[in-house]
Amino acid sequence: MDNEMLNTFVYFVNERENVRIRRAAGNLPPWTMNPVLRDHHFCNIRREDDRGTKELRKVVTDWDVEEIADLPWVYTAARLFNHPITLYTYLMYGVGAVKKRRDRGYKIFNTAYVVSTCGKRMDKVDYVHRVVMEVANIQSLQIHNTSCREVFNALRTVDGLGSFLAGQVVADLKNDRYLEYAEDWHTFSVMGPGSKKGLDFIFEGGTNERNYEDRISTLELLTRGTIPKLHRQDLQNCCCEFSKYIRYDLELPGRRRKFNANT
């Protein structure tokens, strides 16, 4: 383990949270003197604090899902489109209305997640609708589940729902009734490409599917009491954001997303 990187991770998580607190309190920017955090975009340390998650959650709440068993397919649509207006249009008026908005030049997908048709020659909107309907027809999801891992495994049976996106849907379900009492609510997480890079910085490389659980639990143990309390999905998300922080700080190659305090 690289102890210097571990200390930097603790600093990053705390300072990113301080940025959120200062901004929420109405303080004027800059909300940090750290030039990397000041000038670049980073997600919050808790996914529920991110604007995109709040906006999608409001659409689902306003749509007023009567059956909890509908939430898996609703949040699958939410994360595949990842665009609040598109989600509202899809839930209220269906796939045809989404296509009409697209044909009129409106933005349909948010590029935060890369969603493709996985090589299939078909309309991308139709492809998303097919994935959503397959999730809706999974029998094991039509009851109120109590295990994040079981729901994740069920979602992964759908062609077009990779590990990362399935994990994102589970994260939504944890915070909206369906999985709020799951036995593994705190410990469930899924490694993504960004969190792998972050753990590689801290553990000096070699993170993989076999050692991921051991490393994320070790990181949780070592940072307990030094950063805000996080469930492991948020902790792995912090690893992803930390990988960007190190890349920017060390001026390593890769895409950069600048932050504008006025937006």
Image (spheres, rainbow, N blue to C red):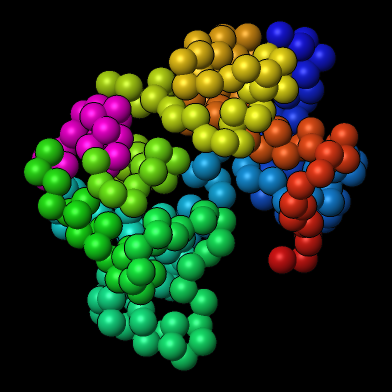
Which quadrant is the N terminus positioned in?
top right
- Residue 11 can be seen in this image: yes
Q: Which residues are magenta?
A: 141-156
* Quadrant of res 143: top left
Q: Is residue 117 left or right of residue 64?
A: right
Which quadrant is the C terminus positioned in?
bottom right
- Residue 226 can be seen in this image: no
* Quadrant of res 126: bottom left
Residue appearing at x 56%, y 27% in the figure: 235
- Is 148 in the magenta? yes
Q: Residue furthest bottom?
A: 104
> Relative to residue 235, is residue 259 depicted above or below?
below
> Relative to residue 176, is residue 130 depicted above or below?
below
Residue appearing at x 68%, y 18% in the figure: 205
* Residue 82: % across, % down: 46, 60
Towards the viewer: 255 or 227: 255
Total marks in image: 0
Residue appearing at x 35%, y 74% in the figure: 123
* Residue 60: % across, % down: 33, 60
- Is 260 in the magenta? no
Residue appearing at x 21%, y 51% in the figure: 135
> Relative to residue 149, is residue 127 depicted above or below?
below
* Residue 91: % across, % down: 28, 70
Towards the viewer: 14 or 203: 203
